[in-house]
Image: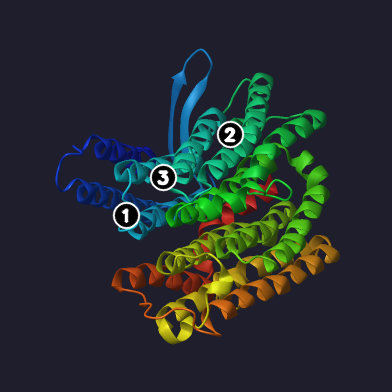
Amino acid sequence: MTNIPILSLLIFFPFIGSLIILLINKNDQSYERKVKEIGLWVSITNFLLSLILLYSFDKTESQFQFIENFKLINDLGIYYYLGIDGISLSFILLTTLLVPICIITSWNKISKNISYFVASFLIIECFLIGVFSSLDLFIFYIFFEGSLIPLFLIIGIWGGSNRVYASYKFFLFTIFGSLLMLLGILTLYFYSGTSQLTLLINTNIPFILQIWLFLSFFASFAIKIPMWPFHTWLPDAHVEAPTAGSVILAGVILKLGGYGFLRFSLPLFPEASEFFAPFIFILSLIAIIYISLVALAQTNIKKLIAYSSVAHMGFVTIGIFSRNLEGLQGSVFQMISHGLISAALFLSAGFLIDRMKTKNIDNFGGLWNQMPIFSVFFMVYCLGAISFPGTTGFIGEFLILLGAFKINFLISFIAAFGVILSACYVLWLYNRVCFGNNNFKGISDLNTQDMLVFLIFLLLIVILGIYPNFLISFYELSTNMLIVN
C-alpha cells in the first residue's frame, strides 16, 4: 500500500464520481435510478478504501503516515502535502461511513435535481477527507472552505420553507470566521516562510504573535464547532436542512472546529492555548448549561437535537483545552461518538417527520404501540445522548470530566451537572414521542432498508461503548504527541 497514493484516491474518487453523475443524460428513462446507484456505489467503494487505510495503519507509529508531498507552486513554496495520524483516520472513517448512509436515506425522498443532490454529497466527502488529510495550511484552507459550498446548496435547494435564510446565515457566519483564519495563515506563512504543518510545529513563534494567530484561527473553529455565542446559525440550519443534510452536518461538519483546535491551535500556539484556556472553559460551561436549558424549552424535534449538539460540543472544547491525556482522548472519542449519536437522532427525527408531516414534539405520542421496533432503536440513541454506561456517549464524557477534574474540580462539577440536564431534555423527548396518547393511526414501522441503517448506528454506539479501546488505540499516540509538543 505504500506505493499507492491512497489519500488522494480517497479524496478525488468521490469527486470523479460526482462528475460522472452530472454528465448522465437527463433524458434517459432510468436517469434517476442511475444517479442514485452510481452515487451509492461510489460512496460504498470509498468506504471500503478507507477500511484498507484502517487495516494498513500502524498504531505503533506516532508520526504522520501515508505521506504524499510535492510542490504545487515553486516560487511560493506551497505543497500538496497529505498525511494522517490516528486522529485524522478516525474522522475519515466517520465521513466515509456517513456519506453512503446519507444517500441511502434520501433514496425515495428527493426528486428535485437529484443529480445535483447526490453529487453534492460526493463533493462534500471529497472536501472533508481533504480537510482531515491536509498537512499544508493553504491546502487545508481550500478543502475547509470548499466544504461550505455543497452544504450551502443542500440546505438552500432541498431544505424546508425557510431554507434560503438558513443557508445564507450558515454561509455568512462560517465565511466570516474563515476569512479571519486566512489572515492568520498568511501571517504565519510570511513570518515562518512555510505553510507545512510539520515545519511550523518546530517554529518558535513569539507569545504576542501567538495570541493574535490563535484568535484568528479561533474565530473560524469556534463558529464551526459551534461554541456559544457563535452557535445561532446551527438550529436554523438543522431545522431547514433535509434529513441527509442534518446527518452530515451533525455527524462531521461540526467536528471540523474541534479537529482544527487539535491539529493547529494546540501544537502551533501552545502558550496562547494555555493563556486562553480559562476563557474557553467559561464559554464551554455556558454552552453546556445554558444551551441545555434552551433545549428543554424546544417543541421542534430537530431544533432540540440541534441545541443538544451545541451543549455536547461544549464537553469537547473542555477536553481539548484541558491539555491532558484523558481530556484529549475523551474529546476525540466524544466527537466520533457524537457524530454517530447525533446522526442517528437526526435520522430518527427525519423518519418521524416524513411519516407524520410535523416537527412539533407535541404532535407525537404513543409510538411505542404502533412502532415498537423504531422505539427500541430510538431508545438506544437517546441513552447514548445522555451518556448511559455501555454507550459511546458515556466513554467520551467520562474521560473529559476526568481530564477536567485533574485541572479544576469546579469545571468538572459544573459540566457534570450538564449531563443531568441532557438526561432531562432527552428523556422528556423520548417520553413525548414514544409514550402517552396516540395521535396517529396506521403508521408503519421501520422497513428492511431503514432497519439496516438504524442497526449500523446501534451496533457502533454499543460496541464502541463496551470496547472503546478499539478506537482509542488508533489515536492514543497522536494525543500523546500533542501533550509532548
In the rendered view, tell whether residue 135 sits above or below residue 338: above
What secondary structure is marked by label 1? helix
Disc 1 crowd rating (10 Å Cα; few below 14, some 14-19, many 20+) is some
Coloring applied to the structure = rainbow
User: Seen in the image, is 430 located left or right of residue 449?
Assistant: right
Q: Nearer the viewer, mark 2 or mark 1?
A: 1
What secondary structure is marked by label 2? helix
Q: Which residue is mark 3?
A: 125
Q: Nearer the viewer, residue 363 or 244?
A: 363
Kind of residue sitting beneath label 1:
Leu
Mark 1 vs 3, N-terminal side: 1
In the rendered view, tell whether residue 409 sits above or below residue 153: below
Q: Which mark is residue 48?
A: 1
Disc 2 crowd rating (10 Å Cα; few below 14, some 14-19, many 20+) is some
Disc 3 crowd rating (10 Å Cα; few below 14, some 14-19, many 20+) is many
Q: Position of residue 190 (x, y in %)?
A: 66, 19
Q: Position of residue 314 (x, y in %)?
A: 70, 57
User: Seen in the image, is 15 located left or right of residue 138?
Assistant: left
What secondary structure is marked by label 3? helix
Mark 2 vs 1, N-terminal side: 1
C-alpha span from label 1 to label 3: 14 Å
Q: Residue furthest top?
A: 75
Q: Nearer the viewer, residue 434 or 120?
A: 434
